[in-house]
Amino acid sequence: MSEPYDVVVVGGGVVGCAVARELSHHRLQVALVEARNDIGAGTSKANTAILHTGFDATPGSTEARLVARGYELLSGYASGAGISVEHTGAVLVAWDDEQAATLPQLAQKAQANGYTRADVIDAAATRELEPNLGDGVTGGMVVPDEHIIDPWAVPLAFAHDALANGCTIVTGFAVNAVDLGPEVTTLTADDHRTLHTRFVVNAAGLQGDTLHRLMGFDGFTIRPRRGELIVFDKLARPLLDRTLLPVPTSHTKGVLVAPTVFGNVMLGPTADDIDDRDATGSTRAGLDALLAKGRRIMPALLDEEVTAVYAGLRAATEHSDYQLSAKPSARYVCLGGIRSTGLTASMALAEEAIRLLAVSDLAPPKKRPDEIAHVHRTPLGEFGRRPYEDGGSIVCHCERVTADEIREACSAPLPSTDLDGVRRRTRALAGRCQGFHCSAEVCAIAAATDGRSMPTWMGRA
C-alpha cells in the first residue's frame, strides 16, 4: 500500500490485531505496527486463557459492556477461524463463611451485568461438582458459560484475517517519536524508519501511556501488574472438570485452577504491581505463594509434575476501568488500560475503535460480504482432531506436532521468526520436555524452510 495510510494501529497484541482485522473489512488502507518481531508475543501470550462472561465486572463500566459483547463476538468467531474453545464452565469456590456470604451479592452483580445463569450452591453441592477440592469449602457459585480458549491462536487468527483483507503488518517497529501534522501524522521507530498516516489507534498495551503522551495527551499511567502461573502436566487433567474460580477482590480476580485447551492444568495468577515493564520472569516468592494456594484449593494437584512456569504483565492503571478516548484534533483513538479481560473483549474493542474513529470524522463504508476474505487455521486444542492423526512425521512427541506443521508455521503469510513463535503456532516445545528432545530438529526444519541458519534459529547467531 502507498502512504499515507488511512489508519495505523500501534500494538500487535490481541486488541491491536482485532482492531486491524475490523478496519481491514472497511474501505481503508490500514497498517498494524508492533515493536516486537512477532505479533501476540507480549502480554497476549501469557494470560489465563479464559473466555469470560463478564459476570463479575463492575456493572455499568465500559469493561463490563465490552466483555459481554466481546464474549458474544469471539464465541461466534472462534469455530470458523479455527480457534479452540472448550465448554467447561466454572465454579466460584468460597473458603470461609465471609466469602460464602458474598456469593448471593456476586449473583446479583452477574444479573446486573446481564448474566442470568449464575447459581449459588452450598458446600456439599460444590464438592459434588469437584470432588478433589481441598478441605474447608463453604459454598460455591456455578457459572456455566465461563469457558477456556486457545489464547495464542486468537491474535494470530485476527492478524491473518487482516493480512488477507489487505492490511500491512510491520514488526520490529517501536514507535519513539510522533510528528502530528495538519493532515498526516508521522510515526518514527527506534531504527529511524517512518510511517505516515491520517489516523492513529493506540493499542500499545504496556506502552499505551507512553504513546498517549507522545500524541500529546495525559490521563493515565500504566504500572504493570505481574501475574505468575504454573502449568501442570496433562496427567493432572482428570482432577477437575471445570475452572475453579476464587471469590474476587477489588484488586484481582485471584488465583484460579483451570484446565487448558491443550490438556494441562494451570494454577495462577499472582497479582503484583511492579515498575519494570520487562520483568516477565518468575520469582521464588510468587511460585511459593501459588503452591500454597494450590495446596488449599486442590491438594492432589501438587502431587503432579510441573510442565512450565511463566509470568505475564497486565496493563494496570490507577483507574478501575478501561481508558478509551477519541481525540478528533489529533485524529487519534486510545484503547488504554486493557487488563486481563482484553482477550475476551478484543472484538468488542475493535467495534469501539470504529465508533471512536467516527467521532474523529473517519467513517468509511464496510466492504461487501463477497469482498471480505475469511481465514481458517488448524485448531490446536487437545480435544479436536489434530494434524498428526492424518499422518505425517511427528517432531515434537510431547505435543504430537508434525514436521509439516513446523514448515507451515515458518512459511505462512505471517511466519514465525523464532522458537517462541513456532511454539505459539504449533504447540511444539510446549510439552513435558520443554524442547529438550525436539528443539534441534525443530530448528533444522525451520532453517530449511526459511533459509536462515541453524545458529540463528537456536538464538546463537
Image (cartoon, helix red, strand yellow):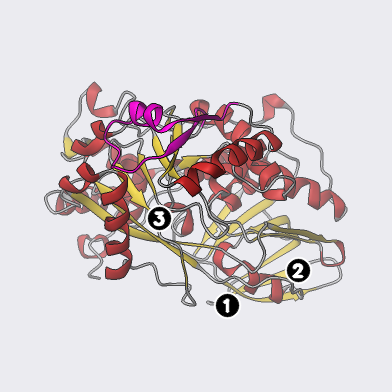
| Amino acid found under the numbered disc labelled 3 | Pro
The secondary element bearing badge 1 is classed as loop
Front residue of this view, candidates 206 and 133: 133
| Amino acid found under the numbered disc labelled 1 | His
Quarter of the image with the C terminus in it: bottom left
Q: Which residues are magenta?
A: 117-145
C-alpha gap between disc 3 and disc 1: 38 Å
| Amino acid found under the numbered disc labelled 2 | Thr
Q: Earlier in the sequence, mark 3 or mark 1?
A: 1
Which residue in the protein does label 1 denote?
A: 192
> Residue 218: x percent and y percent?
74, 74
Which residue in the protein does label 3 denote?
A: 269
Which residue in the protein does label 2 denote?
A: 185
Looking at the image, residue 303 lies above or below residue 226: above
**Residue 188 on the magenta span:** no
> Residue 72: x percent and y percent?
62, 31
- Residue placed at 49% from the left, 77% from the top? 275
> Residue 436: x percent and y percent?
13, 54
View extreme (front): residue = 97
- Residue placed at 67% from the left, 64% from the top? 319
C-alpha gap between disc 2 and disc 1: 15 Å
- Residue placed at 26% from the left, 50% from the top? 295
| Crowding at mark 3 (Cα within 10 Å: few <14, some 14-19, many 20+) | many
